[in-house]
Image (cartoon, rainbow, N blue to C red):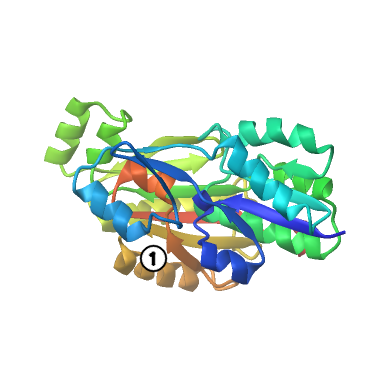
Amino acid sequence: MKIAVVTDSNSGITQGEAGRLGLFVLPMPFMIDGQIYLEGVDLTHEEFYRRMEAGSDISTSQPTPESVMELWDRLLKGYDQVVHIPMSSGLSGSCQTAMVLAQEYEGRVWVVDNHRISVTQRQSAAEAAALAERGYSGQEIKEILERSGGDSIIYITVDTLKYLKKGGRVTPAAAALGTLLRIKPVLQIAGEKLDAFSKVRTMKQAKTTMLAALAKDLEGFLEDPKGQDSYFQVAHTCNEEAAADLKRTLEELYPNWPVETAPLSLSIACHIGPGSLALACTKRLKELS
């Protein structure tokens, strides 16, 4: 059985990378000053941050049903099934939309809702491709990925409260006080929500906090204290030096697998702005051990 694996650009996978990885990426739309742009098609990361710094009005959107079905229809001319991995249903309506659309395809399209985004979503797409190579069907891949959906965590620290305030995630008063006190919040994405986790004063403290939280998670729900069966990822928004430093630290602490680094997807960057740093961990699928 020939299976095509589709994800969206919230995974951080570029159109160029998709070809090399044997994946297909649906570009996410963004509304910037009243005009629609597609991530990785006519909107680069550089242009996105330039417009953000200039104060443009930026909001996220979701792919049109027509664009989703057009991609599926094209792929099903050469593939038996499609496995579609959108961003978490708790962070966007695009997953639910895809599930409704898939009903028209009578078992040829399987939409995965495993509550992932950014580098953990990227990992899911890679795992789906590996499962397909091992002969798993679309339905089996969906079931495996959804069953393991809770086996990942992302911690993010932001450099400024400006964009959290703009998106309504902190009040103007709290943002003003936090800026005055130089507070850097550490956020957590576990499953469906972006939540507050801790507050620190420096990026160094944020790094220490995230690493301590990761170690606790590995001891706890991930059940992998030595990190022997987990993948680690570092992501950032315009913060390559700090990301490289965190990557080196992780590789010293958990030397079993190479640590991947990537820019955070624009759908997250839209809410937190430049200068952020993220640490993610995903437990390895037993089916691929």
Residue 216 visible in image:
no
The N terminus: image quadrant: bottom right
Please provide percent x and percent y for residue 199.
Answer: 30, 41
The C terminus: image quadrant: bottom right
User: Is 152 left, or right, of 102 in this rendering?
Assistant: left
Image point (73%, 57%), residue name = 4
User: Is 75 left, or right, of 115 in this rendering?
Assistant: right
Rendered position, 164 above or below 214: above
In the image, farthest residue toward the left = 180
Residue labelled with disc 1 = 246
Name the kind of residue labelled 1 in the image. Leu
Image point (28%, 53%), residue name = 49
Rendered position, 123 above or below 249: above
User: Is 70 left, or right, of 64 in this rendering?
Assistant: right
Query: Which image quadrant for residue 97?
Result: top right
Residue 228 visible in image:
yes
Image point (44%, 42%), residue name = 188
Disc 1 on helix, strand or loop? helix
Query: Which image quadrant for residue 90?
Result: top right
Mark 1 is surrounded, within 10 Å at the Cα level, by few (under 14), some (14 to 19) or many (20 or more) other residues, namely many
Please provide percent x and percent y for residue 26.
Answer: 57, 50
Please provide percent x and percent y for residue 88.
Answer: 57, 39
Instruction: Please tell me which residue lies in front, 191 or 165.
Output: 165
Q: How many marks?
A: 1
Query: Which image quadrant for residue 77?
Result: bottom right
Image point (83%, 60%), residue name = 2
Please provide percent x and percent y for residue 111.
Answer: 71, 41
User: Is 207 left, or right, of 143 in this rendering?
Assistant: left
